[in-house]
Amino acid sequence: MLERIGDRLYHDTIATPELIKVRTRVREMAESIVAPVASRLATQDERTDGFPREVFAALAEAGLYRIPFPKDVGGEGLDNPAAATAIAVEELAYYSNSVAAIFDVHCILAGNALNQGTDAQGNKWLSRIVNGEIVGAFATSEPGASSDLSATAVATTAIKTGKGWVLNGRKRWITNSVAAGVITVLATTGDRLTLFIVPTDAPGVSIGTPDRKMGNRAQITADVILDSVQLSEELVLGEPGGGLKIALQTLTYGRIGIGAAGTGMAQAAFDKTAAHLATREAFGSPLASKQHWQFKWARHAVALENARTLYLKAAFRLDSGISFPEPEAAMAKLIGTELACDIARDAVQAFGGLGFASQLGADDSEGPVEAIYRDSKIGEIYEGANEIQQWVIARQIFGRETTG
């Protein structure tokens, strides 16, 4: 079995005993449920192979989706649920960033948004997310609006009627949509934005053809089309006009998760490559004897320490009651996702031709790091592009009056 070098180098002095138990438990889940199918998930065809329902169901049975939530909706009621959730994301991403993304959207995005609703909404919808009875999705992005979620950019509309609301629009890049039972949808209501709970079996809701992507191929994304969807008042999430605040708070939480996912992928590429460097001989000695690789991997080890500590710090601030734990959340996403790309790229270089291969012709063995290289890039793009994260950090330095 591959050595988890992070266990030797990273001395976790900030996590509580409860969180350490969560890491151990989720790692066992990932090793038994995700690792055996990770290669298949990484190379599947989104349109023909589809949503990995068997993996989703197995993780539900193991209680994974209970980790982020309070006991009153069936969750575990942990002292630090955001930190525990981020740790779970890292452990899943070590084997499959697709599975980590499915969990992120199901729990951190859809689940967290629903957790801002009424008790009745929580009992009807969130409890079913927690036990894995239904799959959750979160729809803010559109063909013309992604990082920009202003009321002028979001084209999906909700019109008030005597019976409730009527939604029209098209959402894009919606993870889990092909399997979802409920989708939280951001729409314009006049000059404000409102979040709605949209059951996918409601008349007028349809799901487009799944996208084919460079990586994260088991994280199925597709358009969500809303054609005169009629919703009752009970399906407004929060107050009318208050959707942007919930969406931004949810996406801030999501950025902590994406930073953790980047850390997990980075650690996997780091471990695989360290083992290769220690055993692959060139010019009469292991590659690890070359100072170039020694120094490069030493720097990556430092960055991994920083990335893990940053996402935990951001999560702890969220757990303390701070809804927008900036700049730590932005920093965690920025460093975690950039690091995943950096180490994956160096891993491909260290493995040489084998690093560039997805499958070897001689024996059909899988390439060791090619999938991580493909999967890592999306982290720099979604849930707030990294350029946005730098802007958020710059605002903390110079102030909004200067940065805009």
Image (cartoon, rainbow, N blue to C red):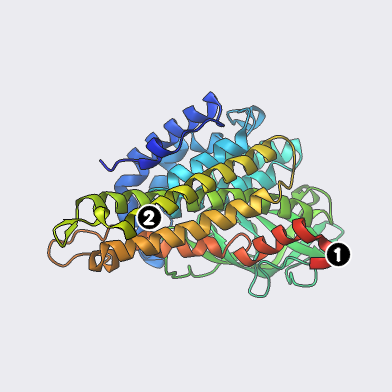
**On screen, residue 242 above or below 225:** above
Q: Which mark is residue 340?
A: none
Q: Is residue 304 left or right of residue 388?
A: left
Amino acid type of the residue that numbered disc 1 sits on in the rendered structure: Glu
Under circle 2, the secondary element is helix
Instruction: Report the Cα–Cα distance between label 1 and label 2.
Output: 42 Å
Q: Nearer the viewer, residue 261 or 162?
A: 261
Q: Tell me if mark 1 has few (under 14), some (14-19) or many (20+) residues whose alpha carbon lies within 10 angstroms of its own.
A: few
Q: Quadrant of the C terminus?
A: bottom right
Q: Is residue 163 left or right of residue 385?
A: right
Q: Which residue is mark 2?
A: 295
Q: Earlier in the sequence, mark 1 or mark 2?
A: 2
Q: Tell me if mark 2 has few (under 14), some (14-19) or many (20+) residues whose alpha carbon lies within 10 angstroms of its own.
A: few
Q: Quadrant of the N terminus?
A: top left
Q: Is residue 299 left or right of residue 386?
A: left
Q: Is residue 236 visible?
A: yes
- Which quadrant would residue 392 be assigned to in this image? bottom right
Q: Which residue is mark 1?
A: 401
Looking at the image, is mark 1 or mark 2 nearer the viewer? 2
Q: Position of residue 9 (x, y in %)?
A: 41, 39
Q: Nearer the viewer, residue 79 or 50?
A: 79
Residue farthest to the bottom, as pictured: 144
- Which quadrant would residue 68 be assigned to in this image? top right
- Residue at horizontal 62%, vertical 53%? 331
Q: Is residue 404 visible?
A: no
- Residue at horizontal 34%, vertical 52%? 38
Amino acid type of the residue that numbered disc 2 sits on in the rendered structure: Phe
Q: Position of residue 256 (x, y in %)?
A: 60, 48
- Residue at horizontal 58%, vertical 28%? 76
Under circle 1, the secondary element is helix
Q: Position of residue 122 (x, y in %)?
A: 69, 38
